Amino acid sequence: MSFKPTSRNALLVLAFCGLILGACAAYEAGEAPAPAAPEPPPPPELTEEQKIVARHVEAIGGEDAIRAHASMTIKGAFEMPAMGLSGEATIYLAAPDKGLVNIEIPGFGSNVQGFNGEFGWSEDPMQGARLLEGGELSTLRNQTRIHGDLEYDELYSQQTAVGETEWNGQAAYQIDLVDVEGNESSRYFAVETGLLIGEEGTTTSEMGTIETSSTLTDYKEFGGVLFATSTTTSIPSFGVEMTQTIESVTFDDVDPTVFEPSDAIKALLPE
């Protein structure tokens, strides 16, 4: 078997020979070799909160799998039995922070919320077109980050590992979070799998600040990443429960024009 060095091998050989010749010349000239460069310091040890989040990231597929996609389209359905409402939902996300949610309710129409990286808006038959601001805007902005599982340190100014507890009958690690806008929430990660299985906190909407509690189940793989395909959210102040299901997730297929606001929204922008 013959060995034919590639250009990379040849460069390595030449570099190695150059090191030898340089060392010999230094020795003949009576010069001592330069001291070896100090080893880089080890990376800082992860906090307990970071370890829990890192385990979740690995459980859903890992950082490389998450960053492999620059956009995604999520299609599913939702149901609110107590109010007799159901419909279809489509979510478009694009890196780093663009997102649009379109909910179609038969007999009611479309409810659209979007954030294009600069401003957020909402349109529905009841309230018409309006720009989002304050807590309502920050909530939407956080939810539209396609790589949000990798951005806890950026999104949350405070993270506290509370310890082991229970969520929906499962042992879970609890992390209390405060985002950069001061909104508080708690997340629950299964001890057995590392997956996110619960979340509770406050959500800001056009109706004000409301408390919510969500349970995430039925993780399935799409494009190398696990998604919770069923989420049940309780809103105690309204006495209602909403179930959201994911039917499909496709990647790198979002047309940028999706995040273009309507003329009604553009008319509300300051000149």
Image: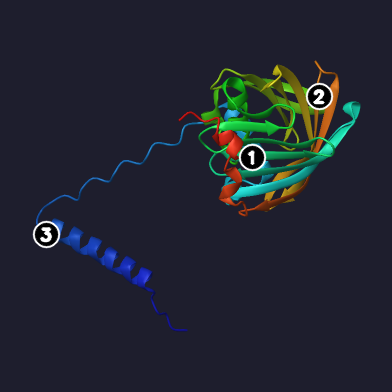
Looking at the rendered image, the quarter that the C terminus falls into is top left
- The answer to which quarter of the image holds residue 213 is top right
The residue drawn where x is 78% and y is 44% is 76
Relative image position of residue 178 (x, y in whole percent): 59, 20
The residue where tag 2 is placed is 234
* Vertical side of 132 occupied by 68: above or below: below
Q: How far apart are marks 1 and 2 (CA)?
A: 23 Å
Q: Which of marks 3 and 1 is nearer the N terminus?
A: 3
**Does residue 145 appear in this view?**
no
Q: What residue type is labelled 2?
A: Ser
Where, by quadrant of the figure, is residue 175 drawn? top right
Secondary structure category for the residue under label 2: strand
Q: How far is disc 3 from disc 2 in space, using C-alphas?
A: 80 Å
Q: Which of marks 3 and 2 is in front?
A: 2
N-terminal of the pair, mark 1 or mark 2, is: 1
Mark sitting on residue 68: none
Which residue does the numbered mark 1 point to in the structure image? 100
Q: Where is residue 177 in the image (x, y as percent from the top left)?
A: 62, 22
Graded by Cα atoms within 10 Å as few (under 14), some (14 to 19) or many (20 or more), the crowding at tag 3 reads few
Residue 258 can be seen in this image: yes
Task: Tell me, yes or no, whether the two marked residues, 1 and 2, touch with CB atoms within 8 Å.
Answer: no
From the image, tell me which residue sits under label 3: 28
Q: Residue at the spot x=37%, y=68% of the render? A: 8
Horizontal and vertical percent for residue 79? 85, 35
As drawn, is 12 to the left or to the right of 28?
right
Q: What residue type is labelled 3?
A: Glu
Q: Which residue is drawn at 27% across and 46% down?
A: 36
Q: Label 1 amino acid?
A: Leu
> What kind of element bears circle 1?
strand
Front residue of 228 and 118: 118
